[in-house]
Image (tube, grey):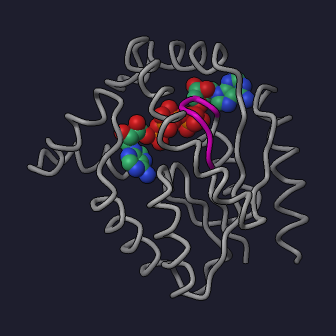
Amino acid sequence: MVNIILSGAPGSGKGTQSDLIVREYGLQHISTGDVLRAEIATGSELGKQIDALISKGNLVPDDIMYGVIENYISNLPADCKGTIFDGYPRTVAQAMSLTELLKKYQMEAIMIDLLVDEQLLIQRLIERGKISGRADDNLNTIRHRIAVYHNQTEPITHYYLHQGNYFAVNGNHPMEDVFIQVKRIIDREGHK
Ligand code: AP5
């Protein structure tokens, strides 16, 4: 079993690489961004609160995210070959909580970090914004999302580096080339 924390700045290719990993390895996949957007789509009170945060490019409070992840892990199928956490954790507190939660279910995870130059991130998201309909795919909010990433999410790299399960990938290349690097890590670490 291999569990993967797929991390990286907005537009680094987390969703794109998750799809490729699922296709190749048959892993389960959770994108916390997708879960939150699905809650917004229900029109619930919680969805309205989440919408106010996401549309400005701010993170949703840790307390809400803990419930989402615990619910997901506790419902993984018995024959699960592993899972991808796409966009989770995004704070050091989330990372610490995930370690504890994984321990409870006798699981471990490696972190794959997609490193992409800022100009390229902006270019990709502006391009996607022309068709995505996402409220956060506009230049001001993209810049804010990247700043939030540097301030609140990037520190988790030190947490995983310290634990010895951090793997960086150069995400500036075409998606197939990035996937070759990702595969190399999964094949090596998944056999340990
Ligand atoms: P989320 O939905 O996770 O958004 P994000 O992190 O901003 O990431 P994106 O989906 O924009 O990009 P991606 O890295 O998945 O790249 P993608 O593959 O799509 O989160 C949204 C919001 O939800 C957050 O801002 C926050 O408010 C909230 N949230 C989520 N998780 C949370 C948490 N844990 N705690 C608190 N709040 C949370 O690619 C982007 C574009 O680039 C696509 O068009 C794609 O085709 C293209 N592309 C991808 N790879 C390549 C490549 N190699 N070459 C060329 N183009 C490429």
58 or 120, which lies in front? 58
Q: Residue 78, percent across and down?
A: 56, 87
The residues colored magenta run 7-12
- x and y, in percent, of residue 107 in the image: 62, 81
Is residue 90 positioned above or below 132 on the image? below
Residue lying furthest left: 45
Quick check: 90 above or below 72? above
Q: Which quadrant does the C terminus fall into? A: bottom right
The quadrant in which residue 29 appears is bottom right
The answer to whether residue 33 of the structure is visible from this angle is no
Q: Residue at x 55, y 52 (%)?
A: 86
Q: Is residue 10 left or right of residue 175?
A: left
Left or right: 129 with respect to 16? Answer: left
In the image, is residue 141 above or below residue 8?
Answer: above
Q: Quadrant of the N terminus?
A: bottom right
**Among the 4 quarters of the image, the one containing residue 58:** top left
Magenta span dominant secondary structure: loop
In this orientation, which residue lies closer to the viewer: 162 or 138? Answer: 162
Where is residue 137, by image quadrant?
Answer: top left
Q: Is residue 151 located in the magenta-colored stretch of the structure?
A: no
Which residue: 54% across, 33% down? 150
Q: Looking at the picture, how far across and down is residue 102, in whole percent?
A: 55, 78
Q: Horizontally, is 46 left or right of 5 in the view?
A: left
